[in-house]
Amino acid sequence: MKTNIRILSAVIATTLLLSTGNAGFAQNQPADNLNSSGHSNDESIRPFRVNIPDAAITDMRKRITETRWPEKETVADQSQGVKLEKLKELSQYWATDYDWKKAEEKLNAFPQFITNIDGLDIHFIHVRSKNPKAMPMIMTHGWPGSVFELLKVIGPLTDPVAYGGKAEDAFDLVIPSIPGFGFSGKPTATGWDSDHIGHAWAELMARLGYKSYVSQGGDCGSVISQRMAKNHEKGLIGIHVNMPATVPAEVAKALKSGEKAPAGLSAKELEAFKTLDIFYRNSTGYSGMMVTRPQTIGYSLADSPVGQAAWMYDEFAGWTFSGGDPEKSLTKDEMLDDISLYWLTNTGASSARIYWEDHSNNFNAVNLSLPVAVTVFPGEIYKAPKTWATRAYHNLIYFNEVDKGGHFAAWEEPQLFTEEVRKAFKTLRSSVK
């Protein structure tokens, strides 16, 4: 019966495609194929709305209820991973009370589009401010995030007056889904690393008519922003990152070899060293798998929604400013919006491949001359000291340490994040063409 439902969904989607063209394709394609590789080299910008078939949602719930569970962990803490009781509670809610259609409404409340770049369909949200002098900004999510983690800041950044800001603080926002994530295409060949994505983002901004712009990102988004700055992508005038790459070479060497901290570190530098040392020793299993074997872990992620949830929830627990209880920072529905997006688009494997493509340590210091702004959130994987940031970013135009928020800064603390981005780019507004 399950196979027949999937076949029927595919037939319906194909019929709609033939009768309605690209818009129907974007809205009604079966979930597993919504983000396959680009179907043409059509560089036009096509409207997009999310409309996952009901059959895919029913199948997700059925798979959740049929989960074969492992035995309980043998420790009292989370040192072995997500606790059985916690994941069972979340999964029960997911299967019975969670409503994906509300998540679709969140996405469809904003203008969404698809365009083909280098043979791959790129999904993005594009919101223009009412202020004609707004600063154009491309914002990039990370893993295990998605465009969902940036939705809360769209209003405050594009319409600052309505949120207590000043008209001159306005941004035009472009928020793409990274290739292999969400509703963007899944690369079918190698080569879509962060450098390539940065080139694609520059092409996207040019295609939208922006001659100059800034880039913002955390996690993978920070890597992409930094690669754009390194490569001096056309039109880019500066970046803001909330996961900076600042670890000096001598510190990185000691961390990699398991040596003691180099002599002469300040108190903040030593704190960063100790935090990273613990992280590398105890919390990088996810990265090791995705850097070296994304396909292997991908089979489990594609087959079990609860497996996908555990893979992501572990990082929500560890990377939010919550002391290991992510529901202090994000609601169940917010986390499940993101987890469901990965499941319904079958992007567990394809999203992991960016780690394989980059094959790099994203905390080690970069060498950038373009203007860079940094905000350090206390719940980030490590708190970058300003002394390290100054060495990595030779034109550091803004640096601030705030007192709340974690790795998913825009998602956890949208007001604070908005204020930081406004201040970060203030000195660059006169450079916008």
Image (tube, helix red, strand yellow):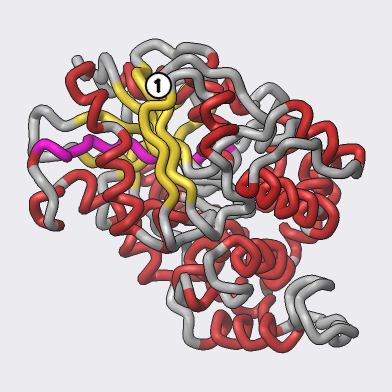
Identify the residue position indicated by label 1 in the image.
371
Span of residues in magenta:
168-179
Quarter of the image with the C terminus is top left
Residue 273 lies, in percent from the top left, at 73, 46
Q: Is residue 326 visible?
A: yes
Question: Left or right: 289 with respect to 195?
Answer: right
Q: Is residue 133 above or below residue 323?
A: above
Residue 365 lies within the magenta run: no
Residue 193 lies, in percent from the top left, at 64, 27
Quarter of the image with the N terminus is bottom right
Q: Is residue 17 visible?
A: no
Figure quadrant of residue 425? top left
Decide: few, some or many residues near mark 1? Use Cα within 10 Å; few <14, some 14-19, many ≥20.
many
Residue 176 lies within the magenta run: yes
Secondary structure of the residue carrying tag 1 is loop
Q: Is residue 13 above or below residue 423?
A: below
Residue 227 lies, in percent from the top left, at 55, 22
Q: Nearer the viewer, residue 226 or 323?
A: 323
For image coordinates 55% across by 46% down, the residue present is: 142
What's the residue type where badge 1 is placed? Pro
Question: Left or right: 317 with respect to 281?
Answer: left
Please count the marks in the image. 1
Q: Is residue 239 above or below residue 301?
A: above
- Outermost residue on the front side: it is 264
For image coordinates 59% across by 33% down, the residue present is: 388
For image coordinates 55% across by 37% down, the residue present is: 244
For image coordinates 8% across by 29% down, the residue present is: 132
Q: Nearer the viewer, residue 92 or 268?
A: 268
